[in-house]
Amino acid sequence: MRSDHDLNAIPENRFDRLSQDELFRIVVDCRENTDPKRPRRAGAAWQMLIAKDIDRVKGIVETFRHPEAPEVRVEGSDVDDVVDSSYERLVKMLRTFKGISEGEYRAAMRTCVRFECMDHCREAMGHDMRRAGSLDERTKDDEGDERGRFDRDIAEQEKERVAEEEALTAGREQALLRQERVRTAIADLKNANRRRVVELTYAGASTEKIMAELDTTRDNVYQLRRRGLKDLGDILDGNHSDDGQP
């Protein structure tokens, strides 16, 4: 496994040789850096990460079914176009993605591709509506809505898409609240070395980086991390047993 130092030495034109895990580590390490070259490096790693995931993206598009209308899907002739537009949408997602784990990336990637599929299907339904002349087909629903049938179907899909986006946003907000609670608990750790090791661990630092910063051995880092995480768990559970001892 390459250390963070080794990854930072790899030029962008060799990113294609890195694993997805290594690419994601570069993204997390570089995206918020104040050095103007680092966010650019994060963007290059992000694009390569998505490119290596393109088969997975295509699989999501090919198997997409609307959750409320399973007959609504991406037609086979449109799959490649939706994969391309999904790639572009995923590249832009770096601007808002704040996750620190590959699991968060995977979940956000799947959601992003599903949104692109829903947008495509909604547009395709609009084309079908215009070709069929169904703009003039007006029926009244139980609430007295006299919009055309396809207009109503499209509006309903949009409402569901917005609801899903809102649910995703709420999930992110909850994750941020949990992260803030953890950060506060870490700050309450009395032992300075344990606190620093836990801080660096949650920031995604490698063991080698922690060893270098604390000028200590691997075994000591493991011991400080184990004790620090136990103290952190006690604080989060309301059991303030951190005694500040080494």
Image: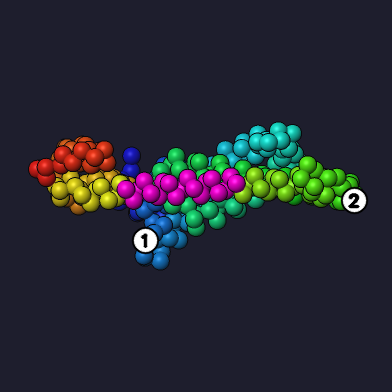
Q: Position of residue 82 (x, y in %)?
A: 68, 46
Callout 2 amino acid: Asp
Q: Closer to us: mark 1 or mark 2?
A: 2
Q: Position of residue 75 (x, y in %)?
A: 75, 39
User: Relative to 52, is 42 on the left or the right?
Assistant: left
Q: Is residue 10 magenta-colored?
A: no
| Residue 150 showing in the rendered view | no
Mark 1 or 2, nearer chain start: 1
Look at 15% across and 42% down and name the residue there. Answer: 242
Callout 1 amino acid: Asn
- Circle 1 is placed at which residue position? 33
For the stretch drawn in magenta, the main secondary structure is: helix
User: Relative to 1, is 70 on the left or the right?
Assistant: right
| Residue 185 showing in the rendered view | yes
Tell me the tag on residue 87: none
Mark 1: secondary structure:
loop
Marks 1 and 2, how far apart at CA = 56 Å
Q: Position of residue 110 (x, y in %)?
A: 56, 41
Residue at the far left in the pictured view = 245
Figure label count: 2
User: Relative to 195, is 123 on the left or the right?
Assistant: right
- Circle 2 is placed at which residue position? 136
Q: Which one is nearer the viewer's eye here, 74 or 131?
A: 131
Look at 14% across and 47% down and name the residue there. Answer: 191
- Which stretch did the figure color magenta? 163-181
Q: Is residue 123 above or below residue 68?
A: below
Look at 38% across and 49% down and name the residue there. Answer: 177
